[in-house]
Every structure is written in structure tokens, then in C-alpha cells.
Image: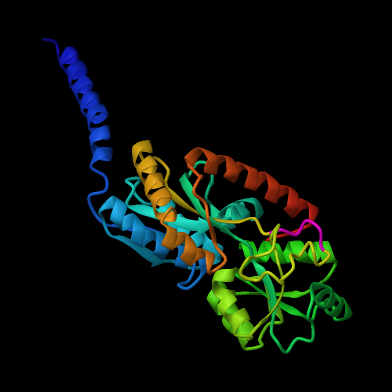
């Protein structure tokens, strides 16, 4: 047998082994602990969602699922870590539409191609922010807040989770639609933003219900409107922002899971089923609903990928129309 033929047979054997072993590898998944990176501080909406779903995923996957909070740079730091991880299904990302916002607003900083560097698994839930003010602020409606801001341009302060975060984009969209000019104050996430609001260090914010509902119910902040297409069953008397007189102002905020690019499709599908199983548990859906979060039982890798493309197109149009910059 010639050396060339021997080499060819060797290559064929290696290829056959790799092809044959891939399904077996997926079938044995998972065989150890799964790490879910949440690029936001503990206590925020993504964190609350991740811990509730993680507990149920442990039951269906038979392995421990831990949450690791990696806040910073509007979710970029944690996302980069997952992009660089081994594509074996043991390091996942749970983040929000901040991922597509950053990709549209400042791609050179994020350094992540959302459509190529990550494998979308599923959207787990959606949520809409609530515009709230410190009780010391003399306004009780969106119209009054806008009037106050116009009477003191460049004076009112609004908290966000940093440039490129969903809260930042909402604020800029709010400014554009109302013609007001306020000072944006960035924080590393919703919990520190809420501390600043409670302490009177900022005028208003648009945090998600998971962190702000208890403060609203306790009377520690005043809710003006919810950035949703319909009223929240938890706050039925609270109008939507559109009802309050600002057409089209809606928070399309999703929270979803990703794996590094190259993760085997069989593993991605296994994770999708585990997420669906988790959000289908009545106690999980009920617990999340109490925080204003609505679970998504229909999302899959294909529909999530389509949503990401739509997000990027929509945000690029809105950024251009509202003259939003990363500075």
C-alpha cells in the first residue's frame, strides 16, 4: 500500500470518527455543570428570570445550572466572555435587547456580530419599563413631567443602565418624541439606578417592573405610565405612555438565551426544550408575572434569529431618525 493511500485512509477514518461521535456527544449532553452568564447586576430582571428558570432547567437537564453576574459596559463585558467560550453548551448568555441595541449604536465598541458570533436559543420572556419619579418631584402624569422638563431644559436627570442599554435607548426615544432635554446619568444596572432614584439623586427613570414594582407598591416612587401596548394587570390604573399622549412609545424588551457560535444544533435544541419546559411550569410563570415579566413559550432558534435581524433594522432606523449617538 502506497504512503499516499495510507494517508487517505487515515484521513477518512478520522473524518468518520468525528462525524460519528458528534451525535453521541450531543446525546450525552449535559454531563456537568452549566454556567449562565448574566451581564447585569444581581437583582435585575435578567437575574431574577435566570435564577427562576435555572432551577427548573436543573430538573430537566439533570445538572446544576449556576448564574454568574458579569455587569459592565451595558452588557458587553459578559457577552464578550460567552462569545469567546468553548461552543459546548456549558457556557450560555442570558441577556436582553441591549445586545442588538449596542450592535446598532456602537458596533465598533461591542465587537460582536450578533448574527454570526452567537447561537440564539430562545427568548424566555418579555417586559416593559415603567416611567417613575421620586415622590419629591412635583409631577403626577407624563404631561406634567414633560412640561417640567421643558420649563427647565438640561436640568432634570434621568437614570439609565449606560449608553447602549435598553433604558438609555428608551430615554433617548422619549426625549425625541417629547422634545425635552434631560441629563442622562448612567448606572451599571437597574438596582443601583433604583437606589439613586429612591435617594433623590435623579429625577426619573424607566426601570423594568421586576425592580420597581415593590417600590411603587410601597409608595417610595411614583409611577406615571408603562411603556407597553396595554396596561399591566398588576397596575390596572396606570396608563400606557401612548394613552398618556405619546404615540408609538413602546418598550420592546426581550430577555433571551444564547450559546457561543458553533455550538452543535442538537445541544441548542436540547437547551430550547429545557427553557420551554421551565417557563411552562405554572409556578414559574406566576412568579414572573408578579414582577411584570411575561414568559414566552413559543420562541425557538429560528424565530429568535429572525427577531434579532428585525431588531437591528428597527434600531438602526430609530437611531438615525432620533439622531441618537453613542457619545
Q: Quadrant of the C terminus?
A: bottom right
Task: Let me know if residue 253 is in the magenta part.
Answer: no
Q: What is the chief secondary structure element of the magenta stretch?
A: loop
Q: Quadrant of the N terminus?
A: top left
Q: Residue at x 71, y 81 (%)?
A: 203
Q: Quadrant of residue 126?
A: bottom right
Is residue 319 visible in the rendered image? The answer is yes
Left or right side of 223 for 275: left
Q: Quadrant of residue 190?
A: bottom right
275 w.r.t. 5: above or below: below
Q: Position of residue 287 (x, y in %)?
A: 47, 66
Is residue 39 visible in the rendered image? The answer is no
Q: Residue at x 75, y 59 (%)?
A: 249
Q: Position of residue 137 (x, y in %)?
A: 75, 86
Q: How many marks?
A: 0
Give the camera-side residue of 326 and 157. Answer: 157
Give the camera-side residue of 301 and 56. Answer: 56
Q: From this viewpoint, which residue is outermost toward the left?
A: 1
Left or right side of 294 for 137: right
Q: Position of residue 227 (x, y in %)?
A: 70, 63
Give the camera-side residue of 72 and 237. Answer: 237
265 w.r.t. 248: above or below: above
Which residues fall within the magenta stretch?
Answer: 246-250
Left or right side of 324 for 63: left
Task: Let me know if residue 247 is in the magenta part.
Answer: yes
318 w.r.t. 136: above or below: above
Left or right side of 228 for 267: left
Q: Position of residue 27 (x, y in %)?
A: 25, 39
Q: Residue at x 41, y 64 (%)?
A: 52
Amino acid at each position: 500500500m502506497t504512503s499516499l493511500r495510507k494517508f487517505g485512509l487515515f484521513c477518512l477514518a478520522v473524518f468518520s470518527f468525528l462525524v460519528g461521535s458528534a451525535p453521541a456527544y450531543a446525546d450525552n449532553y449535559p454531563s456537568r455543570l452549566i454556567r449562565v452568564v448574566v451581564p447585569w447586576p444581581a437583582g435585575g430582571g435578567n437575574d431574577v428570570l435566570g435564577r427562576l428558570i435555572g432551577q427548573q432547567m436543573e430538573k430537566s437537564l439533570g445538572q446544576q445550572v449556576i448564574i454568574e453576574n458579569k455587569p459592565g459596559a451595558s452588557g458587553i463585558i459578559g457577552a464578550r466572555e460567552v462569545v469567546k467560550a468553548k461552543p459546548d453548551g456549558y457556557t450560555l448568555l442570558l441577556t436582553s435587547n441591549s445586545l442588538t441595541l449596542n450592535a446598532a449604536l456602537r458596533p465598533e465598541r461591542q465587537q460582536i456580530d450578533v448574527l454570526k458570533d452567537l447561537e440564539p436559543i430562545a427568548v424566555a420572556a418579555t417586559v416593559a419599563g415603567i416611567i417613575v419619579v421620586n415622590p419629591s418631584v412635583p409631577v403626577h402624569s407624563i404631561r406634567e413631567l414633560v412640561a417640567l422638563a421643558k420649563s427647565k431644559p438640561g436640568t432634570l436627570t434621568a437614570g439609565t443602565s449606560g449608553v447602549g442599554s435598553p433604558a438609555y435607548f428608551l430615554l433617548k426615544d422619549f426625549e425625541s418624541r417629547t422634545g425635552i432635554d434631560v441629563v442622562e446619568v448612567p448606572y451599571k444596572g437597574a438596582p443601583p439606578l433604583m437606589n439613586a432614584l429612591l435617594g433623590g439623586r435623579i429625577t426619573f427613570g424607566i426601570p423594568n417592573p421586576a425592580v420597581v414594582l415593590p417600590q411603587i407598591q410601597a409608595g417610595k416612587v411614583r409611577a406615571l405610565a408603562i411603556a407597553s401596548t396595554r396596561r399591566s394587570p398588576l397596575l390596572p390604573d396606570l396608563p400606557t405612555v401612548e394613552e398618556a399622549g405619546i404615540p408609538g412609545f413602546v418598550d420592546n424588551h426581550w430577555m433571551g438565551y444564547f450559546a457561543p457560535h458553533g455550538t452543535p444544533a442538537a445541544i441548542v435544541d436540547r437547551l430550547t426544550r429545557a427553557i420551554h419546559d421551565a417557563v411552562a411550569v405554572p409556578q414559574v410563570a406566576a412568579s414572573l408575572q408578579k414582577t411584570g415579566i411575561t414568559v414566552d413559550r413559543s420562541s425557538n432558534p429560528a424565530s429568535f434569529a429572525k427577531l434579532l435581524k428585525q431588531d437591528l433594522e428597527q434600531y438602526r432606523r430609530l437611531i438615525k431618525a432620533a439622531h441618537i449617538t453613542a457619545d
